[in-house]
Amino acid sequence: MDYYLVKEAPEIPLKSSRTRPRFESRLLRAIDKVLKRLGTQYKVRRVNSVLLLEVDKDVINSLVTIFGIHSVCRVTPREFRNLKDIAHHAEELYRDVVKGRKFAVRVKRSGKHRFTSLDVASVVGAALKPYSAGVDLENPEVTVKIEVRGGVAYFIDRCLNGPRGLPVGVEGRVVSLFSGGYDSTLASWMIAKRGCEVDFLHLYMGSAESSEAAVDVAVRLSNWFTPYEPRFLVVDFTPVIAEIVNRVSRDYRQVVLRWSMHYIAQKVAAEHGYDAVVTGESIGQASSQTLKNLEVVEKLLPGVSKRPILRPLCGMDKEEVISYIRELGLYGLTSRVKEACRIAEGAVATRAKVGKLKEEIDKLEEVLDLVYSALMEFKVNEADKIKSLIKAFTEDVEVDRVLEGAVLVDVRPRDEFNRWHPKGAIHVSEVLNRVAPDKLVITYCDKGVASTIYARALRAIGFKAYSLRGGVSRLKTLEG
């Protein structure tokens, strides 16, 4: 059997007598889940202020991914009655280890004893010195580490630092705007470290490869969130991007895109009971992330049920973020996620005006409600299902003619629909209220680009939808 001393993060013992048991209970749940996932048999008991685990296999690398753990040490426990016993145990365990090498003894002690830590170090050093090349307290080749707790001496074989923080679940539930790139990944990790249960909201931007990579990042990242099992929410955001490109002023496109992402996240948070929204935004990192733009974006979000926006990376630069990601062992996965293409042309507004931004975002009301209605929710461990949905976003949905019995759906702006549309066609804003999900639907627009995106969005919520290749010009040809 292997034995481990598990020390809680320093914050936990400082909690009140009413709060601390809840934190420790959550930490024990996390440890239990990790060990059961590994298929181990184990026992756990509290020794003073630490946990002693007795496990049938090596689990140290898994334990140090649990938030709320300060450190994990693999130890050999030995009971003792006096200092002579401790020295005897040390000689038995370390005489071959220190042979011909310089060594030092480091001792920590907890509890009431008739001796000090220095007394322990002295008798152990004296017992091992004959086997060694001498004592060297400055640059030892071997360090003998001992923790004395009550009537047991724990001889430390190996120690690893844990992530510290708070056990997941002691704070609230949050939803993270999650691309799977460096920023959103680290932001999610940092908020989970503060005890929050983090779910992922992924906005599909048109690249199946990047979105599938984001799923893989979420799966790996969720290993840190034990005992919580995160959910992965997906929205096909390409209709929104198409509308922004087609209808929004060029210099405001990036800011409107950022507002739209926040709008969907806030709507998800309000309707699914999340306490806050998490983003990987950093002040000034991109033109749409200037402090002024962030202020204006936040000001124009619906206020009645608006949730706090948590930005744990707001003071970091990209180099710092990537450094953290490397330390977490997530660089390879996150590097597969490519940033969405810039949709602005020319200069981008870095000090957006409230009135102008309001004018631009009002153009998106219908498409935002449409894409939100197609929100899909999964457990993170349903990665194959999520990837199948993402692949469906890229399916060929185009047809060259109006199929018999189909309802024509115009996805152009309302004013263009009012100026001209084929007899019997309806505007996209009316689909959800007027068309049964099992009805055949064919979308169209000016050139057949936005209509393809809308057809995929409608398919995601159960419609049998297609897009007319060639758009309005083909319709007029077919009618003529």
Image (tube, rainbow, N blue to C red):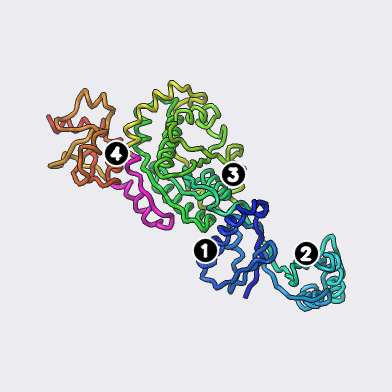
**What's the distance in space between the residues labelled 1 and 4, CA to CA?**
42 Å
Amino acid residing under circle 4: Tyr
Locate residue 10, reporting x and y percent: 68, 53
Residue range highlighted in magenta: 371-395
Crowdedness of circle 2 by 10 Å Cα count: few (<14), some, many (20+)?
A: some
Upstream in sequence: badge 1 or badge 2: 1
Q: Which of 126 and 288 lies nearest the eye of the viewer?
A: 126
**What's the distance in space between the residues labelled 4 and 2, CA to CA?**
67 Å
**Element class at badge 3:** helix
Image quadrant occupied by the N terminus: bottom right
**Element class at badge 4:** helix
Residue 109 image label = 2
Pointer 1 residue? 33
Q: Residue at x 48, y 38 (%)?
A: 307
Do callouts 3 and 2 mark residues in contact (Cβ within 8 Å)?
Answer: no
Pointer 3 residue? 321
* Disc number lying in front (1 or 4): 1
